[in-house]
Amino acid sequence: MAAAPGTFTYGQYRIPPVDEQVHFGVGQPAPSLLPLARVRAAAAAKLAEEDPLLLQYGYISGYPQFRESLARFLARGYGKDAVDPELLFATNGVSGALGLICSLFATRGDAIVVENPSYFLALSIFRDFGLRVAPCRLDEDGLDTDELERMLRAPAPAGGEPFRPRFVYCIPAFHNPTGYSLSAARKAHLCRLAAEFDFLVLADEVYQLLGFDGAPRPADPLCYFDTPEVVAAGGRGGAAGHVLSIGSFAKITAPGLRLGWLQASPAGAPLLKRIYNCGQLDSSGALNPLISGVVHTMIESGSQEQHLAAVRAELTQRGRVLGDALRAHLPPGATFIQPQGGYFIWIAIPPPLHGMRLMDFCVVKHRTRFHPGERFGTGLDGFIRLSFSYYSAPDLAVGAQRLGEAMREMIAASAPAASIADKAEEAKQ
Amino acid sequence: MAAAPGTFTYGQYRIPPVDEQVHFGVGQPAPSLLPLARVRAAAAAKLAEEDPLLLQYGYISGYPQFRESLARFLARGYGKDAVDPELLFATNGVSGALGLICSLFATRGDAIVVENPSYFLALSIFRDFGLRVAPCRLDEDGLDTDELERMLRAPAPAGGEPFRPRFVYCIPAFHNPTGYSLSAARKAHLCRLAAEFDFLVLADEVYQLLGFDGAPRPADPLCYFDTPEVVAAGGRGGAAGHVLSIGSFAKITAPGLRLGWLQASPAGAPLLKRIYNCGQLDSSGALNPLISGVVHTMIESGSQEQHLAAVRAELTQRGRVLGDALRAHLPPGATFIQPQGGYFIWIAIPPPLHGMRLMDFCVVKHRTRFHPGERFGTGLDGFIRLSFSYYSAPDLAVGAQRLGEAMREMIAASAPAASIADKAEEAKQ
């Protein structure tokens, strides 16, 4: 029954090896970063206990000892003295949490705000719920909250209502696809706007704990800015209690655990209570009680933190090697901000390059692949996203070289045509 | 770290021992029916494999070998030659599946039909989604499909639309709370109505495999009636492909696994495809891949079927002991149909008894508790539901005796008052 390594039993799809293609689109942990031995040991230790209630429906928000353990783990990761376990709520991962929150807090036709660009699969979830997505620009300090404020203060269109989103979905730390992080000042600003205009903020902080070794820690998770003090300092009124920070073990441990958590501020505790009281959880109990037990054991034994350190060290090396290789190989005009954590590098490609056409060219002629920018929002033809989570550092360097060659070849091939187009453009002016 | 048995680490809430109270409301498996040793062995065997992709996002519908194994298990349970694994879809249990299906297939304000009575926590889920619930009567053959047909064929109200539900939610096998099963003839009728009036049927078949030893197997799961042949035999037109059979390991193995499945007919395969393609699953991959692996091992080793046999034997004994004790102790006029499987006995209590007041009286004076009928629908004051899943057969017999005493005492105490009320009623006529 045991599957030999290399047979294809569990993976969702086949990912090519470097000689065949470097698929920079893969936003999954590499197999070498999946801690099978640690999960094996933790499951054995947890299931060696003799309490069969481990298999019962279980506490809706996650059993208390698990949340206490998770709180200590997060406090160390956030650099806090303590995290209140009563403000944590176990989920079955970010996607499941987003689905549950949308079902409880939003109605088909509601407007929501997302960053442009944003995580394309979250956009699919919102589309399934019939939500109207309003994109808001972001820059290297994250979501442009000044732009968001303009959207909110804009006068209502004739005969219409002013713009009032049900929630803002954002990825504050090492954003997907850009790798940018929301600054502390903007986090405070966002929480003030949420208080004044009474919308939720769903902060997908799945990369929060994946800062590179030696890099400054990103600003605190967004829920820490959802306080009466921060709101009062804005002087525009409204109350705190609008933020859900959404975390996950998918990237820091393993996607297949399907375990994550919500964190609220004390002011936001009623949001957790509403989820606690929903019909689905009243019926099911905890969202993932047995796996919570396994991860509880991983945290308590120190195994979780050892693994996180190994993941961070590996991502640090990969991100830096890929950055160096891109700086060495990309043509002039292709620019990016070196990430300080997470999974991604977001590259602005110079005209006449176009993300989708470049990708097609890379696949056919240069054994590389990636996600073109337009998958992540609108007006993003001039960007591409590279993930460095899956391939090893040497493989990533090979991919960067191929990508640089592809760009240069495509620029060279299109140069005369571009010149003609430029002249035609001049003639019209 | 290991919790000693008896400490209260994992359970959702404390359940009283028999000397304190027999809580007939508890619809959970008894701790003695939770197969901790089997799960321990299966997890050890599965995690002894060396393929780290077990921890990856995983096939959206459940990895193929798991579904093949599940298909063989279900075929044996259903008495079929084979079940097509391509028509199975792994979920994280019935509640999660209902949430996901509501989010994809229904819109706030949609009408749906449920049995009256129905599982009260499913009703909470539908309320969270803003669905308008239309109850339909049921009897000992299950949902009254003639009544449903009358609802569907009723002329539209003046200025309104005819009644068109988005879906029917039903519990065809050993129904909660009544224990009744939908007959094969009505299953066919329901599928014809779904085809003609184009609504979905969500068949919560969580008790399907829990028929008592020696009792006839319930009619096939509802998806087996969702065929072109059944629809054509109705002669009213419409196409098959409207049914999702929803199963779960919660009752046949353990709730804490959070693992279940959907099954469709070949005609209903597009329903599974729509779920497969939704944003949430595109993002998360499989809903519970690691636990699917554990249960896969339990099935392949025979452990799952051994456990199911033990659960059925125990439920058979409990259901029969409780039925016998109720027949011995209930007062005249209290009636019920002896269940042939599942978890529940549904008792019609004679006037002047009233479910909620009887429950209060039982809790205060007779150390028993249950769910009064009105929790499950409307006009059900004259019913109560007893679950026999949690307490041992001797404890259930004790509870039945206490319940009988409570009913007799309450009837005796209210007899004069009832007479006066009767006379006042006569005087008015």
Image (spheres, coloured by chain):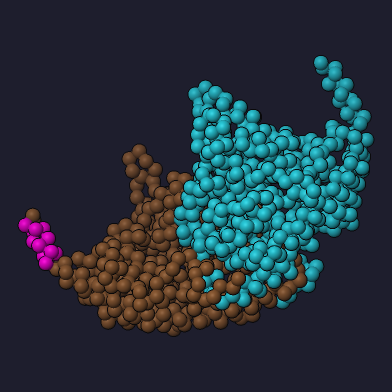
Chain colours: A cyan, B brown
Q: Indicate the position of residue A332 as horizontal and vertical percent values.
A: 90, 34
Q: Indicate the position of residue A415 as horizontal and vertical percent values.
A: 91, 31
Residue drawn at 83 percent across, 41 percent down: A358
Residue drawn at 59 percent across, 53 percent down: A83
Q: Indicate the position of residue A34 as horizontal and vertical percent values.
A: 74, 62
Q: Is residue B99 left or right of residue B20?
A: right
Q: Is residue B104 above or below residue B373?
A: above
Q: Nearer the viewer, residue A81 or A130?
A: A81
Among all residues in the image, which is located at the extreme left?
Answer: B427
Q: Residue A376's quadrant in the figure?
A: top right
Q: Look at the image and tell me whether residue B192 can be seen.
A: no
Q: Residue B211's quadrant in the figure?
A: bottom left
Quarter of the image with the N terminus of chain A is bottom right
Magenta-tinted stretch: B416-427
Residue A390: in magenta span: no
Residue drawn at 73 percent across, 41 percent down: A180
Q: Is residue B26 left or right of residue B420?
A: right
Q: Nearer the viewer, residue A192 or B264?
A: A192
Residue B425: in magenta span: yes
Q: Indicate the position of residue B347 as horizontal and vertical percent values.
A: 30, 70
Q: Is residue A24 left or right of residue B80?
A: right
Quarter of the image with the C terminus of chain A is top right
Q: Is residue B267 above or below residue B398?
A: above
Q: Residue B307's quadrant in the figure?
A: bottom right
Q: Is residue A98 left or right of residue A16?
A: left
Main SS, magenta residues = helix
Among all residues in the image, which is located at the extreme front?
Answer: A81
Q: Look at the image and tell me whether residue A196 can be seen.
A: yes
Q: What is the count of numbered marks?
A: 0
Residue drawn at 16 percent across, 67 percent down: B414
Q: Is residue B379 above or below residue A40?
A: above
